[in-house]
Image (tube, rainbow, N blue to C red):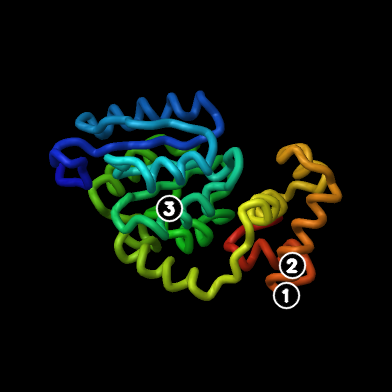
Amino acid sequence: MTGITDGDGAHPLVAILDNDFLTIDAMRRIVIERLPDARIVWTGTDGRDAIEYCTNTRPAPTLLIVDMSLQGLQGPEVCRRIRMNSNRLAMLGMTSFPLERYTDAMHHAGAQGIVSKAQLSQIGDAIELTASGGAMPGFDVPKTACIRVRHETDDRVPLTPREQEVADLCAEGLLNDEIAARLGMTEATVRKHLQHAMDKLGYRSARQIAAMYGRYVD
């Protein structure tokens, strides 16, 4: 198979990012089955670690399989930050939630597709497709996605990393006390970060923040 490969032109380099170790093991088995020449070079649970690994290590992965719900930054924001620095890495999202909850967010983040964790055969097909340089319907290939994301990001009002984390969790539907427990801060600090984010964006609600940053809330 002709694909995105490492420096010797032989082996796709795959990284897997998920907050559940059983899912990581399951994805590892699917990769080995569908991409027998691939090397799984990294697995992790924290989105911030993935950004560092995918942008500042060599050789970098050529395919990142990423869950939507992670420690730290969430899946779409992880992909967006990586895409800002990479026009080569393919990124495939996966989720246990309905796909429509994240499809637009992942497109805008520069990913090459998103699949349901319940559809194992579809996951395998999507892994083969994205590892070979393709993209699922409605998504862009990496180089095109990189150009678009960089252009769109130029027009965004930047949030601090902590404001972004709070906005991400709010967009997932977590209440202030749940966000505080997840991030190890007080509810007052959560409210402060949300207020700062709303002031920057000129918005009056967390729902508007979520929509601005490509998030979905129920």
Of mark 1 and mark 3, the one earlier in the sequence is 3
Up-down: is 113 above or below 204? above
Residue placed most toward the observer, 110 or 81: 81
Dot 3 amino acid type: Ile
Splitting the image into 4 quarters, where does residue 147 fall?
A: bottom left
Up-down: is 98 above or below 210? above
Splitting the image into 4 quarters, where does residue 38 fall?
A: top left
Q: Residue at x 78, y 42 (%)?
A: 185
Marks 1/2: CA–CA distance: 6 Å
Residue 112 percent location from the top left of the image = 37, 54
Marks 1/3: CA–CA distance: 27 Å
Up-down: is 39 above or below 143? above
Residue 60 percent location from the top left of the image = 31, 42
The C terminus lies in which quarter of the figure? bottom right
The N terminus lies in which quarter of the figure? top left
Of mark 3 and mark 2, the one earlier in the sequence is 3
Does dot 1 land on a helix, a strand or a loop? loop
Up-down: is 132 above or below 49? below
Residue 207 percent location from the top left of the image = 72, 63
Q: Which residue is mark 3?
A: 82
Q: Which residue is mark 2?
A: 198
Circles 1 and 2 in contact, beta carbons < 8 Å? yes
Circles 3 and 2 in contact, beta carbons < 8 Å? no
Dot 2 amino acid type: Met
Does dot 3 land on a helix, a strand or a loop? helix
Q: Residue at x 43, y 24 (%)?
A: 25
Q: Residue at x 29, y 54 (%)?
A: 88
